[in-house]
Image (spheres, helix red, strand yellow):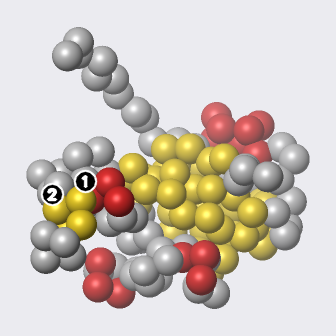
Amino acid sequence: MTDHSFEIDPIGVVRTPFERPADTPKQGVNEATEGEVVLSREYEPGLEGLTSGDSIDVLWLADDADRSTLRVRDGERGVFSTRSPHRPNPICRTTCRVRAVDGTRLAVTGVDMLDESPVVDLKAPMR
């Protein structure tokens, strides 16, 4: 296989009340937990058009995940058939509801990430 490796630089971080993996909900979209996505200043123009009430997919890295995991749930499932953060490339997606946009800060509801998790992209959900 040809080497197609590349770097992904975070565009910001997410602020949440969760300090330990055991504290995080299983699915953020099902939770009312509030948090904040804080982007680096140079990405502020990319927030144009986002308003309160919008949904946004936050792509983030589970930087403490076990990257060697290929089976989960006591070996019952392959990791690619789950939303487990433990995977070869721990890129995670959480759909959040935007509460407010203030400069480089998005106040959101529905977080399920650890505090200070790196954010790598924001995307409008498929419609």
The answer to the question of whether label 2 and label 1 lie on touching residues, with beta carbons closer than 8 A, is yes
Image coordinates for residue 95, horizontal then vertical, percent: 62, 64
Residue located beneath label 2 in the image: 69
Tell whether 84 sits left or right of 47. left
Of the image marks 2 and 1, the number of the one nearer the N terminus: 2
Three-letter code for the amino acid on which mark 1 is drawn: Arg
Q: Nearer the viewer, residue 41 or 86?
A: 86
User: Distance between the Cα atoms at labels 2 and 1?
Assistant: 5 Å
Label 2: element kind: loop
Q: Counting other residues with Cα less than 10 Å from the Cα at mark 1, is it few (<14), some (14-19), or many (20 or more)?
A: many
Can you identify the residue that label 1 sits on?
87
Whether 32 is drawn above or below 90: the answer is below
Give percent across and percent down for residue 103.
76, 53
Which quadrant would the N terminus be assigned to in this image?
top left
State the residue at coordinates (71%, 53%). 125
> Within 10 angstroms of label 2, few (less than 14), some, or many (20 or more) residues?
some
Amino acid type at image mark 2: Thr
Residue shown at 12% from the left, 52% from the top: 68
How many labels were placed on the picture?
A: 2
